[in-house]
Amino acid sequence: MPLVLLVFSQSHVDFRKAEFEAICSMFAIRVQNMQVLNENEHIFVLNFETCSDVEKLLTRSVLVKFAISLSLEANTYEDLYSQIGKNPAVVDNFDKPDESFALRFFAVGRKKKLDGIERIKMFLDNVPFKNAPISLSSPKNELYLIEKYSSPTDENPIKIFFGKLLGEGRSELKTKYNLRDRCYIGNTTMDPELSFIQANLAMILPGNLVLDPFVGTGGLILPAAEFGAFVMGTEIDYQTARAKGRSSRQGVGMRNESESIKANFEQHCTDQNLLAILIADSSKHGVWSSNARFDVIVADPPYGVREKARKTVKNKPIVSNEEYTQYQQKEEYNLETAFCDLLNLAARILVSNGRVSFWYPVILERYCPKNLPQHPAMKLISNCEQPLTRKTSRRLLTYQKIREPMNEEECEIRKTGVSHYRSVLFSSKPSINP
Amino acid sequence: MKLFVHNFMSSRFLKNVTVGYPLELTVKQFVEKDIEFDRENMIVMLDKIQYEALLVAAAAVNQSDRIPAEKPPKWDELSDDQLKQFHHLLMNIDVVDGELICPETKTVFPIKDGIPNMLKVDAEK
């Protein structure tokens, strides 16, 4: 059973365990000591069953930076060298004339920069490689010396690890999908790294049908398409869906002709996975036929702060000129109703075991888990927090459909939680506890 | 809008509409692209579709001859070539310009630049 050292990103620590668990269930990966994962440390030794399980994990994880097949673990360098002295095969395995190598250094938990080259020299003085040629650019064996510190000011590491790199995670995706280079963005386009984490929590697999009922400029379904799913989105705002009107980029003015949701997919050659963008009201579930079934729903419903939360209403006068004849009047969409509608929609149109993952705004002093939307047919799988301001945060809630909903079953939010999100956010007075 | 999507859409959200399915479809312009065929994915997708609605969609692009008039009893018994005909209709055909029409109220939902607008102003009248 291979012991594997996983080095995690130090950002979004609250999402770490949930992402790891979701990817493990995606590929039926079993890790015996999964409980060692926590938010305070960033490297963990885990017990995988096979190396191919680790490879599968790395194809998806945004928060795992890289994985090392652990050869040695020591408390001091003396300890490390004496272990190698007792068991030289550990290093000799990598010291073959026909296999080039590189040795890299990495330290976790220390603020001050360490001289990695010095450490590598010191290691190689004690553990000489006699046969293997060095190749820094494309080594056959990429070896790592990793130091773990318990406190940023400590002089000496508490652990030293040595092993061979198995591979890197998918942190490059956040750069590949960075918003600066994205063709079309909106006011509330999701941070790319979080959008990929969300795709993992929702367990999006190749060939899945994925829906975003508040699609905006498509930021949440781009990762789904990258992972091979077929995606659809509905958007209530005519201008957003058609990429008309003012750009969300500062100083740009009007959006130009080349901007569109489709262009975002073309940019990454995933437009073949885009099934459709519809202009529709996601509060009207009847837009979906009774045979419609999605594997996954991802959503970032508008909180009414930077994007208005709206649904359509009847019998209101319509402003009519060329472009605007397409508009139907919209009214403010109560936030709690919006989230209940979303969970009810998920309970209806998801396949069995399908997941819905959405962002839920929280006023910190009013938060308690009872505030979260609940539905008898949906099981809450994970609840990860991203702090936003002193008073607020948002939580990524992921639910799984455990059975078909009965006729009368509806989502409920037990205690008023989000409905005053906007008013609390914009008030200078301290809010009163309910 | 890929032709597949038509199969999942209804106009039940309109007032006094009880079934609203399948939507009538007129296609003024469509493009055909080669999307990679995957047998397993296609079968999963075909399990979700409603066959009568697929026939409506096939007729709208004048390609009814691609598929049998009766629903095949089992999707996984179909050959790759047969499945590819379904794949072509559902995945390769992208409707650019046309209309979706409610079968009961005849409300028209225009498809422009590939984007259907289900919010048409007179939709609720």
Image (cartoon, rainbow, N blue to C red):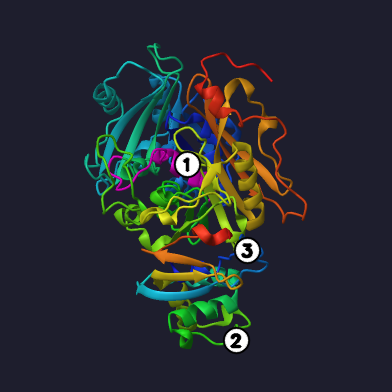
* Position of residue A174 measured from the top left corner of the image (x, y, whole percent): 36, 41
Classify residue B2 as left or right of residue A334: left
Q: Which residue is identified by label 2?
A: B70
Classify residue B54 as left or right of residue A61: right
A330 or A384, which lies in front? A330
Q: Which mark is residue A197?
A: 1
Q: Amino acid at mark 1?
A: Ile
Range of residues picked out in magenta: A180-203
Q: Is residue B112 above or below residue A47?
A: below
Residue A73 is covered by the magenta coloring: no
Query: Tags 3 and 2 in contact by the CB under 8 Å rule?
Result: no
Quarter holding residue A157? top left
Q: Is residue A133 above or below residue B73?
A: above
Q: Which mark is residue A338?
A: none
Q: Is residue A17 in view?
A: yes
Q: Give the mark toward the camera: 3 or 2.
A: 3
Q: Is residue A140 above or below residue A64?
A: below
Using the image, name the chain to which the residue with label 2 belongs. Answer: B
A13 or A70, which lies in front? A13
Q: Are marks 1 and 3 on the same chain?
A: no
Q: Give the mark toward the camera: 2 or 1.
A: 2
Q: Amino acid at mark 3?
A: Arg
Q: CA distance from mark 2 to mark 1?
A: 43 Å
